[in-house]
Image: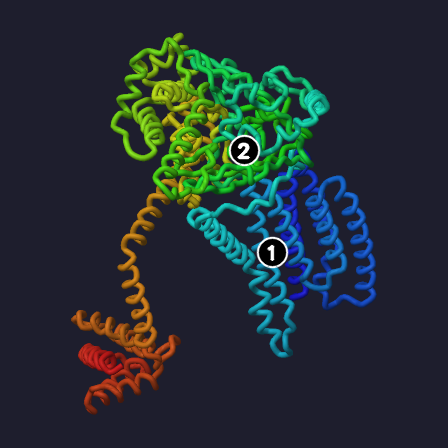
Amino acid sequence: MINRHINLLGGLLAGLVAAAFTVGLAGYTSTVMAEWGGLVALIAGSVVFVTMVLDIHNLDFHNLDSDKLAKNHKTAEVIAGAGLVFFLGAIFTLGLIPALISLLFFAQLALNIRADNNNRIYSALVIGFICLMCGAVEAKTGDYLMYMACFGALALLALRSVFLRRFLAVEIPAGLEVLSANKMNAPIKNNFLGEFSHHSKLIVVFLGLAFITYLFIPRFPAGNLGARVSASAHFYNNSDWEQKAKNAEAAEPDAEGSRDEGNAGGNDPFAADKPPSEQSPNLFSNNPQKTANNSANNSANNNTAAYYDYGGFDASFAVDNPDPSQTRASNALILRVKSDVPLYLKARVFDNFDGLRWSQTKAPLDFRRLERGNYALDKSSLANNPRFKQQEKYYQVFVEASMSDNIPIAEQLIKLSFPAVMVAEDGFGQWSAGSILQKGTAYSAEVQFNIFKGRQFSAITAHAVQVTAATTAAEKMLAEHAAHERLVRKQTLENYLSVPAQTEPRVYQLASEKTQKITGEFPEFKKAIALEHFLRSEYAYDFASIFNSQGVTPIERFLFETKKGHCEYFASALAIMLRTLDIPARVVTGFLAHNQNPLTNYYEVRALDGHAWVEAYVDDIGWLVLEPTAYYPAPEVDEEPTHMTAKKIQEYIKNLERIDEVTAQPDWSLATVLRSFWYAITLIFTVALAAIKVAIFQLWWLWIILAFVTAAGFWVWAHYAGQIKNRYLLLRVQKMPAIAIVDSLNFIHQALINVGRALPAGLTIEQFNACVASSHLNAEQQAEVIALFNDHYYSDKTLAPQQQATLAQLLRQLLLSVLNVV
């Protein structure tokens, strides 16, 4: 009977382990091979399941003979050899990780054949878990949590079945067959539903704990393993750029030095602003994003419906119509960004404004060759300023919709890993690929964050270590030299100071009024922040204004009449107001990666996140990033970023709902309903958690006192629990005017249990007599209560009412005596 149950459990166990293995493998293949990964996982899991079922008798390894084991070992060696051959071929075709996964798959098949213990079960669960984790690294959507939950439930059931099987397989000593049949076979035979219920409870408890842990335990950023250009589905090879670069190198043999990494326009804030005669000899070219067709593999199969065409990425754009193709009127996903912090991803920089259109001064293209997909700048060339807190950050970008050839980059760039032979950098430090970025492109970068007074600077001016002058004359000379350097730098930024001739005087007056009271150190920095705050607090974001022209002088109308508009109005207004104060300013377009999906930790950049903001050169210290549009979060650097997943979920859902509201595209799908429901739940949990957090941090002294009181209470309870229970029982008895005979006996029994003088099985006659002997009753009362008790319980005659009343009274006195004694 037991052997049959063992085999039955073995079959169930084989199915559970194979299912867990399949789920783990499916999780991996569904992320790296999206088109046919599910089929591969199904086939592989089926093979594992079949081998487990065919060798189910191996689970009963007590009955295996040596010949059978030897035959299985030879078969396993053949499978292992085939796996090694497949691994060697896969490592050069599929890559290292897929090859290792396939090797683990064949190793599991070999274990299934030759196993004579439970190791194959554990190894299958471990390999499935490894596959699951490899897939988790690549997963970019929250759907992957389903794989993880299913694997966890199946693994829990499998481990539970392993325990039961080992319990049943224990050798039963002679003479205990009946006991074993009653105690061991019966539950398996008759309580299957009970076992299933128990398993279900375990799954619910563990998944519930995992869910709570996920929501409320802080999640810190995962370590990055480095750039992997091989993750990109496209490679960019611009033959025209390569030829131009070769011609330039042949014509100017010394030009390579002028194009050294340290002279990139993105790192020197003044390199791009020098007149062409002072710049290195190079090729001048317009941005090729709309006309380039240099790569056949990139231009083929362009899906115009999925193409993101934001006008702000062109060489010029109109403020009143920055989105002529209307690709921003949706919440379509454009990029996924893996980063520890929100990022401003720059695509274009504009310096010229005629009152309606922003454009670029014709900028040179410096062609940068990539070594194995990598381009690294010399870190020693980066500006260093002791006033700044500098941090190095790494991020990855995955393109989800085809877009212009601009490569959105967060400054200040240190290293770029991009799937191309060559990329181009213009005089403003912005990068392009030579042809449109197609869906499936992946790249990564390492950047340096420059933080000053809690604000981010895209580029900074180098400052030497402060020199102390020996004399007053020397101090004067140093001051004059510093002033001259600042003047020269300011002169190179003249193209960032021009104001359209038709700008009305009231714009100058408004900028002056909002900043006239600012004095002290870093006045330009403070003025820029003040104007940013003014626009964020006094003006409203209106996405619909993108499609409704506001006339030929939109800035004045925006500032003084409508007081609402899209981000291009906000950015243009702030840039012009800064220029009226003689503060160099420029408009920057790109993407704002600020909406982080808490399920995947990826920032989701949507069509609406195509954005324009401002950079201002302040106080001769660098380019300050400014965000005048209140719809987008302020660009302050968060010193204590949020790691609480429940809070992240709340912020993520708020952003999605805001996008739906702004784009006027309400969605009443099941996903929206579930999202709203999830938001309500997380909001409740978040508020409760915030209250707990405040109580912990503000009433810490009270928690210390409570900890001591709790520890003392546990000690008292451990040593005096019985006496405490009896004192409570005594209070109850004293409040009762009369107690029935049965209740008195039950109370006596409970009092003895509390102090360890009786067992829960029931009050024996010996224990009752001992209680009577140790009580405060006199000898006559003791004899009477024993006699009445014996007559009541151990004789056929019925006590008269008077005798019952006497017994009840004596039992009450005995109970009070027992409670006072024990």
Please state which of residues 533 and 465 is positioned toward the viewer in this rendering. Answer: 465
Instruction: State the residue position of label 1.
Output: 158
Residue 652 in the image: state x and y as whole percent: 44, 35
User: The disc labelled 2 sits on which kind of residue?
Assistant: Arg
Mark 1 or mark 2, whichever is nearer to me: 2
The image quadrant of residue 296 is top right
Counting from the top left corner in percent of width and height, residue 454 is at 38, 39
Q: Are marks 1 and 2 in contact (CB under 8 Å)?
A: no
| In this picture, residue 140 sits left or right of residue 318 | right
Q: Amino acid at mark 1?
A: Ala
**Label 1 to label 2: alpha-carbon separation:** 37 Å
Q: Residue at x 34, y 33 (%)?
A: 522
Q: Earlier in the sequence, mark 1 or mark 2?
A: 1
Q: Residues within 10 Å of mark 1 (few under 14, many from 20)?
A: many
Above or below, 66 relative to 758: above
The disc label shown at residue 336, or none: 2
Other residues around mark 2 within 10 Å, as few (<14) / some (14–19) / many (≥20): many
Q: Give percent across and percent down for residue 333.
A: 53, 28
